[in-house]
Amino acid sequence: MVRKVMSLFLATTLLMLWVPSAFAATNNSVDRVPHVKDSHEFDENFFVRLRIEEAYPNHFGTENQHFRIHLHNAEWYDDSHPLNASRIGTQTMTRGGASVVAVRRVTSTIMDVTLRSDGSTDEKALWVIPLFTKVTGAGYATVTIDGRDSMVSSGTYSFAYGVGRSDDLKIQLDVTMPVGEHRQMPVGYEFGTENPVKLLIQENRAGAFGPTARSFQLRLEKALWFADSFANLNVSAMDQNSHVLSGKNAAIQQISKRNDQVIEITVHPGVFSGDKMMLEVPLYFKIAEPGEVSLNMSLVGSSIREQRYVVGQALLEDRDRDGVGKKDEDYVKDSSDKDTYKDKDNHIDQDKEPHYKVVQFFIDKKYYVLDGTIIETDVAPYIKVFDDGLGRTMVPLSFASTALGSDSVEWIAEERKVIIRKGADRVALTIDSSALDMNGEVILMDVPAEIVDIGDGLGRTMIPIAYVAQAFQVEYVWDDVLRAVTFMKPVE
């Protein structure tokens, strides 16, 4: 009965999410709210981005969308400035058939904007607009979108905090995301050595830092710093991979971990060299729970307000690759990657109540994530690709049993058979056989269980997780961008 109610809830939620609303609007946001001097002028090396994204693909149709952007406590550069309205238009990044038709400065605080989507793709159109502006006073600088008669949502967003003379901000902190990084990520996703978030620490003028060392605290929300046992991703690794970009005598003196969500970075300017100090620190961390993931930065011992940078949204749901029971025509192959497949209609919205444990596996990663905690393994999940371009996710049974909530796993060596028990249910698989025995009923799979060598004469049993999960009626979802499978395991 509980399973039926759960399935009905998921199906109802799916229908509610899938049907586009005629009154849906755009998703708008800014990527940061830096603290700057109350007269700061943003340039091409340091600026804030305003993101405008369709609520669903082809929402705009092919009609031009005209709206206005108003500034408070800030001004647009005039037409004679290199970063004028025309430059904003040419530097706007787009995706999904989006384009910029026109950007025109009306007054020092008002800009007319015309956007368009050609409706040529099934991807939501996105515009990332650089806010080339100058702050005109202390306090928050805001940007207000006046949607007028367009399909662009109206709203007001803080994009900078101007610090007055009494605060005298001497150090500028900025965060940059990895190139091409998605702003939506699954729980368990990690920023590591190949795709770090980068912290830039720089003086506003040479010598502004002063002669002594100072410390900054970085506090994560909905995310965790890596444990010390992860030698390539812990605070020591961040310290070793930091760089001095200018100010030859400056140095990261120490990076220390206060707790799972707070680290402290101590910077020493060294002997004054006449150059502005600028340092870059890679930040390695993992997403721990759903919601808005942010990085909050403060100068230890200062009255300056904490700076907050939104990294993105952590999600528990996405599309399922395996789709057991689907017909071949329900799948399409992504031509950009031979191992990327998309299920056209299978999108399950998972219940996010806290009575569920979250277990997540990443393809080609030798670990899994259990409720935000990374657990290392000796073998990674992989995709078993078929001749027709489809594939199955193969997961190590010994670790997948946690996700499946099984009571026991038994290996019968002489028969090369593994038996999984969960309550009154029993599933048996034989190595290199396509038969799955579920309580005496045989189900034919399109890929058999197999053993992979992990060295020293040992091996791990790999199973096609879709079939076993379906047999035990365990809900799971697949992220076809980040190549991760997530299980929601009920806690009794």
Image (cartoon, grey):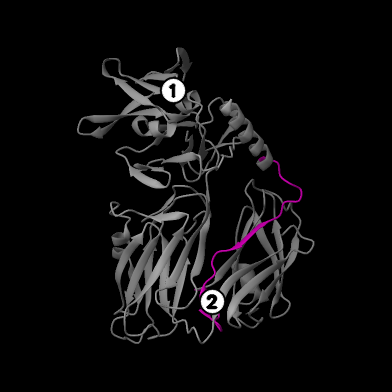
Residue 310 in the figure: left or right of residue 370: right
Give the residue type at disc 2.
Answer: Asp
Query: Which quadrant holds residue 420?
Result: top left
Residue 319 in the figure: left or right of residue 365: right
Q: Secondary structure at mark 1?
A: loop
Pick whichever of labels 2 and 1 is earlier in the sequence.
2
Q: Is residue 131 above or below residue 444?
A: below
Badge 1 crowding class, 10 Å Cα cut-off, few under 14, some 14 to 19, many 20 or more, is few
Residue 192 image point, x, y percent: 38, 55
Asked whether 22 or 253 is in front, the reply is 253
Q: Is residue 260 in the magenta section?
A: no
The residue most toward the left is 456
Q: Which mark is residue 388?
A: none
Part of the protein shown in magenta: 18-45
Q: Which mark is residue 43?
A: 2
Q: Is residue 42 in the magenta section?
A: yes
